[in-house]
Image (cartoon, rainbow, N blue to C red):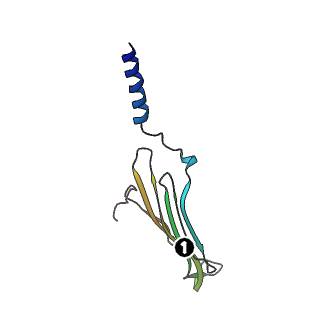
Amino acid sequence: MNTLCALVVLATVAAVYGAPAPAESDAQAVIVSQTSDVQPDGSFNYAYESANGIKVEDQGSIKSIKVPKLDDTGRQVGEEEVQVSVQTGSFQYTAPDGQVYTLRYVADENGFQPQADHLPVAPSV
């Protein structure tokens, strides 16, 4: 009987120590690395990584572009120069099923333009 009890206790201890550690909650994830640089001209870059595998990188700058200048009726009467923000970056995270997702993007005067393997692609026109 003592041998059986000892075996049960040893099996229980082995099972507990052999079990994987519980996943850390995303709410408790800490930042493990972080950089940030902001310049007087409006350009910037930053990056960070958290303990749960989230990674983010972003760079931005201001650029000048020419756009149509319109009169009160909506007719084009020339061009004017405006400043726009341009950002490029990426982020990565691990989904609950273990799949790692990465998305890269550009955001400029043409809008937000994401690229990722998991995003649907519009058919060619």
Give the mark count: 1
Spot the residue most to the front: 2
Callout 1 secondary element: strand
Q: Is residue 98 left or right of residue 89?
A: left
Where residue 85 sits: x, y (%)? 57, 74
> Hey, what amino acid is under mark 1?
Gly
Q: Nearer the viewer, residue 13 or 68?
A: 13
Where residue 83 sits: x, y (%)? 59, 79
Q: What residue sits 53% from the left and 44% below the top? A: 25
Question: Which quarter shows the N terminus?
Answer: top left
Q: Nearer the viewer, residue 53 or 78?
A: 53
Spot the residue most to the bottom: 78
Q: What residue sits 64% from the left and 80% below the top? A: 40
Where residue 4 sits: x, y (%)? 37, 17
Where residue 32 sits: x, y (%)? 53, 58
Question: Which quarter shows the C terminus?
Answer: bottom left
Q: What residue sits 34% from the left and 60% below the top? A: 123
Image-quadrant location for residue 39: bottom right
Q: Nearer the viewer, residue 94 or 50?
A: 50
In the rendered view, would you say 54 is above or below 90?
A: above
Spot the residue most to the right: 72
Q: Nearer the viewer, residue 10 or 38?
A: 10
Q: Is residue 123 left or right of residue 111?
A: left
In the rendered view, would you say 64 is above or below 113?
A: below
Q: What residue sits 42% from the left and 55% below the top? A: 101
* Residue at mark 1: 60
Q: Is residue 52 left or right of residue 125?
A: right
